[in-house]
Amino acid sequence: YTPIEHAISKGIRYFNPGMSGEHKVHRGFCGTLDSSFLWLPDLRLDLLFRGNIAQFNDYASEQAANHCEQSPLEYCRQSWRKNQTL
C-alpha cells in the first residue's frame, strides 16, 4: 500500500487514510464517520437529497459499525464503541 510505505519511509508517525471504503479495515485502519455540508442549487435535486439523506446516513452508520466489529484489531472495535457512546 503505497501511501503507508511513503509515510514509513518519511518517518511520518500518523497517517489518515481518508473517509469511506470497506477495504480500509483490512489494511489496519478504523472506520470513522464524518459530516459534510452541501449546497444544491437545483431545487429538485435538493429535495431528492433531503428526502433520502436520513436513510443513507442510517445505512452508512450500520455499514461502518459492521466493518469495525469485524476488524481483527481490538483497538478499532474499542474506538468505535467509545465514539458511539459520546
Image (cartoon, rainbow, N blue to C red):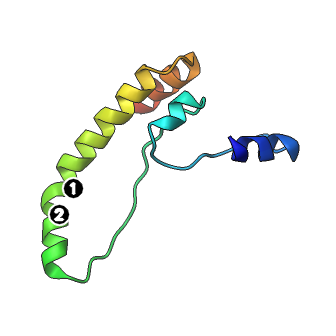
State the residue at coordinates (57%, 21%). 75
Residue 19 shows up from this direction: yes
Q: 48 or 84: nearer the eye?
A: 48
Q: Are marks 1 and 2 in contact (CB under 8 Å)?
A: yes
Instruction: Locate the N terminus by quadrant.
Output: top right
Where residue 76 sits: x, y (%)? 53, 25
State the residue at coordinates (31%, 76%). 39
Q: 51 or 24: nearer the eye?
A: 24
> Going by the image, does 27 lie left or right of 70?
right
Where residue 20 sits: x, y (%)? 45, 46
> Going by the image, does 41 lie left or right of 69?
left
Q: Looking at the rendering, which quadrant does residue 33 occupy?
A: top left
In the displayed structure, 39 sits above or below 68; it is: below
Most extreme residue toward the front, as rendered?
1
Mark identifier at residue 50: 2
Q: The residue under label 1 is which amino acid type?
A: Ile
Mark identifier at residue 14: none
State the residue at coordinates (25%, 83%). 41
Q: Secondary structure at mark 2?
A: helix
> Going by the image, does 83 lie left or right of 16?
left
State the residue at coordinates (87%, 43%). 9
How packed mark 2 is, by other alpha carbons closer than 10 Å (few <14, some 14-19, many 20 or more), is: few
Q: Looking at the rendering, which quadrant does residue 62 occupy?
A: top left
Residue 85 shows up from this direction: no
Where residue 56 sits: x, y (%)? 23, 49
Instruction: Locate the C terminus by quadrant.
Output: top left
Q: Secondary structure at mark 1?
A: helix
Q: Which residue is mark 1?
A: 53
Where residue 32 sits: x, y (%)? 47, 40
- What separation in Å lies between label 1 and label 2 (alpha carbons)? 5 Å
In the displayed structure, 4 sits above or below 46; it is: above
In the displayed structure, 53 sits above or below 76; it is: below
